[in-house]
Amino acid sequence: MELSEIAGKLANLGFSRSEDVYEEDHYFDLRGCSGYTEGSVLRFRRVESASGVRYKLTYKSPATLSGVKARDEFEVELGDDGVFRVLKMLGLRDFAIRKRRSYFTGADMSVSIDEVECLGNFMEFEKVNPRSAEEFIARVRDVLRKLGLDGSELISKSYLELFLASNCK
């Protein structure tokens, strides 16, 4: 199914398209840092949209549940790419993930349709503080069924994990 067709079906389900962006994510390899916890992530994101360019720095704690990416996140809006340049000057290795993303909101969740360079096309479902992982997965499967995508594989790996396991480097 074409991505534009999925976007149209999401609209028919009551989801509103909120933004189309190009995102360049740089994930920093923190394994050599003394306070590093396995599974935690530091990401610098550059976002290009119709309204201009934005920058964000995000720390993600290790995932706490299997089957879904449930974890704490701390995100800071930045005025420019200075933090990125400092992290590079410190010698931290980074992995770049580039994607075109369309954001949709509705049905008490957000959905993004992603075209990820080298990895392919994905849909990402997100809900802040769902009652349970089981309820969230059931809701995702319901939306997929209504889109005609029932039986689609649910992937809980991050784009970074998929990237590192691929030949994209």
Image (tube, helix red, strand yellow):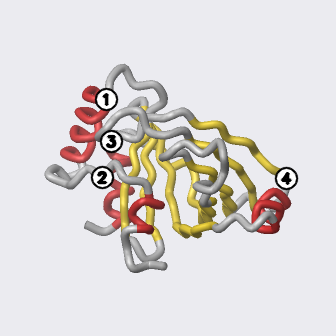
Quadrant location, the N terminus: bottom left
Q: Which residue is mark 4?
A: 79
Q: Report if the CB atoms under discs 2 and 3 are less than 8 Å apart.
A: no
Q: Which residue is mark 3?
A: 13
Instruction: Please state which amino acid type lies under the numbered disc 2.
Output: Ile
Please name whichever residue, 105 or 31, is drawn nearer the observer in this view of the structure: 31
* Residue 76 horizontal side relative to residue 149, left or right: right
For marks 1 and 2, the one nearer the N-term is 1
Give the mark toward the camera: 1 or 4. 1
Instruction: Please state which amino acid type lies under the numbered disc 4.
Output: Gly
61 to 9, vertically: above or below: above
Instruction: Please state which amino acid type lies under the numbered disc 1.
Output: Ala
Q: Secondary structure at mark 1?
A: helix
Give the mark toward the camera: 2 or 3. 2
Where in the figure is residue 147, as x and y percent of width and height? 24, 50
Give the mark toward the camera: 4 or 2. 2
Residue at (60, 66) in percent of width and height:
22
For marks 1 and 3, the one nearer the N-term is 3
For marks 1 and 4, the one nearer the N-term is 4
Tell me the distance, in whole angstroms, between the alpha carbons under discs 1 and 4: 35 Å
Q: Which residue is mark 2?
A: 155
